[in-house]
Image (tube, helix red, strand yellow):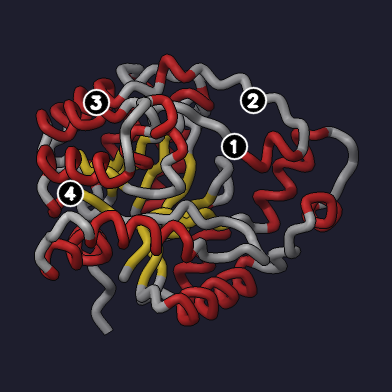
Amino acid sequence: MNDCHCHFFSTQFFSTLANQRGKGDTAVQLCRMLEWDDPGTAWELASRWVRELDTAGVSRAALIASVPGDETSVAAAVANQKNRFVGFFMLDPTSPDAPDRAWRAVKDLGLRGICLFPAMHQVPLDDERVRRVVEVAEAHPGTAVFVHCGVLSVGVRKKLGLVSRFDMRLGDPLGVSRLAAMFPSVPFIIPHFGAGLFREALMAADSCPNVHLDTSSSNGWIRYSPGLTLEDVFTTALAVTGPSRLLFGTDSSFFPRGWQRSIFDTQKAAVSRLGLSADDEALIFGGNFDRLFPAPRT
């Protein structure tokens, strides 16, 4: 089993949030406020993730640097455990140095997933600045572009009272389909089944074979579609994408909560009730991840 969606809440991540609060807090103080564990160094946090994944029986995981500018933290984790981690990083395309940062992260640091949050950074997916970032992925085969669509709510920001002026109109999976059509060699990943824009995510995936859906989180967006169940979501997604373009993920993030087994148990039970073959289940819960992000040869 692999997990395609875990957040790497590093010390740099907490320091960035502390700076945004503007109250003079340190990263350690923020962790105490949240009643979360201090992550320590990137190396220490990576080692803790290894122990956590070992306990959970997870072979490999994607770790996401969850604020722009934190690429080096995830790169340190990947360097620590190249066979266990695949490095993703959040990038703000509106930053003047975004293409250069993307290039360095992919070419020099060995990261393999560029994460775009158009609602957060208030940039349309048809913006030229987004296209320049995707060009970096195109120039480095094996690099995916992860695009958060639909509803966007960042729990840690709410806990800290940080204002989040997200423009969810910009997170439309149909915009992803346009990019995917322009860059057919680049794998695109839409997390959380589109996070409330399920129909649009399915349309994007149906029109572009390089669009993948990740299954991560509790998928609480289902409440926006009365009568829809998680089993219905998997059934419908499989009818459109087949088993080869669904990527299991949990959206795990902070400690001491750690890896969210309950999400795995819920999704595994839903998929098991569909009567898929063992091979098809294996694709969803690990094989597709290994195909997109092969482990380095030893």
Disc 2 or 3, which lies upstream in sequence? 2
Q: Mark 4 and mark 1 in contact (Cβ < 8 Å)? A: no
Amino acid type, callout 1: Val
**Residue under numbered circle 2:** 164
Q: Residues within 10 Å of mark 4 (few under 14, many from 20)?
A: many
Give the class, few, some or many, for how many residues have Cα within 10 Å of label 2's Cα (few <14, many ≥20): few
**Would you say 111 lies left or right of 70 here?**
left
> Marks 1 and 3, how far apart in space?
23 Å
Q: CA distance from mark 4 to mark 3?
A: 16 Å
N-terminal label among 1 and 4: 1
Q: Which mark is residue 245?
A: 4
Which three-letter amino acid code belongs to the residue tagged 2? Answer: Ser
N-term mark: 1 or 3: 1
**Local SS, label 1:** loop
- The picture places residue 46, in percent across and down from the top left corner, at 55, 71
Residue drawn at (24%, 79%), measured in percent from left and top?
297
Marks 2 and 4 sit apart, C-alpha to C-alpha, by 31 Å
Looking at the figure, which quarter contains the C terminus? bottom left
Q: Secondary structure at mark 4?
A: helix
Mark 1–mark 2 distance (CA, rounded to whole Å): 8 Å
Per the rendering, the mark at residue 199 is 3
Contact (Cβ within 8 Å) of mark 1 with mark 2: yes
Q: CA distance from mark 2 to mark 3?
A: 26 Å
- Residue tagged 1: 154
What amino acid type should be assigned to the residue bearing mark 3? Arg
